[in-house]
């Protein structure tokens, strides 16, 4: 599945509530463009909430948070891309475990579709205007602004060839994923080592998704869910994809048909049944596996029973 769509960032700042010395709208525009070029994807959202304004859980409450205006603004921005398509979520700083979960999972409909990427370099905090690295990046933004092509195409990653692009590739990054569903799952980190100007986060991320979550991981996860939460499996086969998009810690659905293939295997093992529906319905399941030549497009429309 391609990472597609558009970047969402309704307000930009090098730290909410704190004015970055010498910062300007031009620098912010250049940095946003450079982060898009770094991502190599047309779809993403930036997490720029500073440490001082990070969300905090209220005592004795598993649900409610104390959230700043910058946190609420981030939630509105993230909501615009919470539609189940894979979406890069690019943090301007490294996050502790609890904040990682809040950034990806709190209030989202499709938590497992957000791919959290943090800076890999210790001490990198682009949300803090007092950070030496943030100051360095602002200087590089000013330099890059002088190199911007007058007639540059929107899809031309021109910042990747500037010192700003080089520095961002050094800073980013690491992909954060969860090893099992919450509440028991814990975040894990996978380094992303970018090199030349053609290197992007998505170029490295997509192969990693296939490596980390092969077909077997979907087969195992779906078999466990079918055994413990049978109520999830009703309607067309394609609806089985939903749980992999919504539940953080399940395999990330990099290929929509990975869930369909997992259903097909359970049917062929006799552990599930699917039907064409209607008066002359065909039923596949125990003793009657799905024909090998049935196209994927036809199988995804069968009904799980």
Image: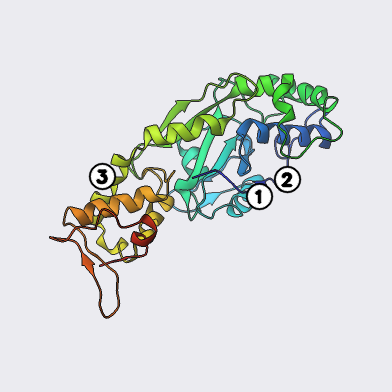
Residue at (72, 22) in percent of width and height: 161
Q: Could you classify mark 2 by the number of other residues whose Cα lies within 10 Å: few (under 14), some (14-19), or many (20 or more)?
A: few
53 horizontally vs 183: left or right: right
- Left or right of residue 121: residue 151: right
Mark 2–mark 1 distance (CA, rounded to whole Å): 8 Å
Q: Which of marks 2 and 1 is nearer the N terminus?
A: 2
Q: How crowded is mark 3: few (under 14 residues within 10 Å), some or many (20 or more)?
A: some
Residues at circles 2 and 3 in contact by the CB criterion of under 8 Å: no
Asked whether residue 263 appears in the rendered view, the answer is: yes
Is 267 on the left or on the right of 260, as rendered? Answer: left
* Res. 220 mark: 3
| Mark 1 burial class by Cα count in 10 Å: few <14, some 14-19, many 20+ | some
* Residue 186 locus on image (x, y percent): 37, 36
In the image, what residue occupies the spot 62% across and 34% down? Answer: 40
Local SS, label 3 = helix
The numbered mark, 1 or 3, whose residue comes first in the sequence reads 1
Up/down of 295 relative to 152, above or below: below
Q: How far apart are marks 1 and 3 (CA)?
A: 38 Å
Instruction: Identify the disc placed on residue 73.
Output: 1
Q: Name the residue under label 2.
A: 11
Marks 2 and 3, the one that precedes in the sequence: 2
Q: Which of marks 2 and 3 is in front?
A: 3
Residue nearer the viewer, 297 or 173: 297
Can residue 94 be seen? no
Q: Position of residue 20 (x, y in %)?
A: 77, 31
- Residue 184 in the image: above or below residue 130: below
Say whether marks 1 and 3 touch (CB < 8 Å).
no
Label 2 with label 1: CB-CB less than 8 Å: yes
Residue 270 location, x and y as percent?
A: 16, 57
State which mark lies toward you, 1 or 3.
3
User: 286 or 139: nearer the eye?
Assistant: 286
């Amino acid at each position: 599945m391609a990472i597609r769509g558009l970047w969402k960032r309704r307000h930009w700042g090098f730290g909410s509530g704190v004015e970055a010395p010498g910062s300007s709208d031009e620098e912010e525009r250049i940095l946003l463009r450079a982060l898009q070029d770094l991502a190599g994807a047309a779809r993403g959202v930036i997490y720029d909430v500073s440490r001082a304004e990070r969300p905090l859980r209220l005592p004795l409450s598993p649900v409610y948070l104390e959230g700043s205006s910058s946190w609420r603004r981030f939630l509105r921005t993230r909501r615009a891309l919470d539609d189940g398509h894979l979406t890069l979520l690019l943090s301007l700083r490294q996050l502790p475990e609890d904040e990682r979960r809040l950034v990806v999972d709190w209030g989202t409909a499709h938590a497992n579709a957000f791919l959290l990427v943090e800076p890999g370099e210790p001490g990198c905090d682009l949300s803090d205007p007092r950070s030496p690295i943030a100051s360095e990046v602002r200087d590089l933004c000013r330099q890059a602004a002088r190199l911007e092509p007058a007639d540059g195409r929107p899809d031309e990653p021109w910042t990747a060839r500037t010192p700003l692009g080089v520095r961002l590739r050094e800073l980013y990054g690491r992909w954060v994923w969860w090893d099992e569903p919450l509440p028991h799952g814990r975040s894990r980190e996978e380094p992303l080592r970018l090199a030349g100007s053609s290197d992007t986060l998505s170029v490295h991320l997509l192969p990693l998704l296939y490596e980390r979550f092969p077909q077997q991981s979907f087969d195992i996860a779906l078999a466990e869910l079918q055994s413990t939460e049978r109520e999830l499996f009703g309607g067309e086969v394609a609806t089985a994809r939903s749980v992999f998009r919504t539940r953080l810690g399940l395999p990330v659905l990099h290929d929509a048909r990975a869930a369909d293939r997992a259903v097909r295997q359970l049917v062929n093992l006799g552990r599930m049944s699917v039907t064409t529906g209607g008066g002359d319905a065909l039923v596949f399941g125990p003793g009657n596996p799905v024909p090998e030549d049935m196209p994927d497009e036809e199988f995804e429309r069968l009904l799980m029973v």
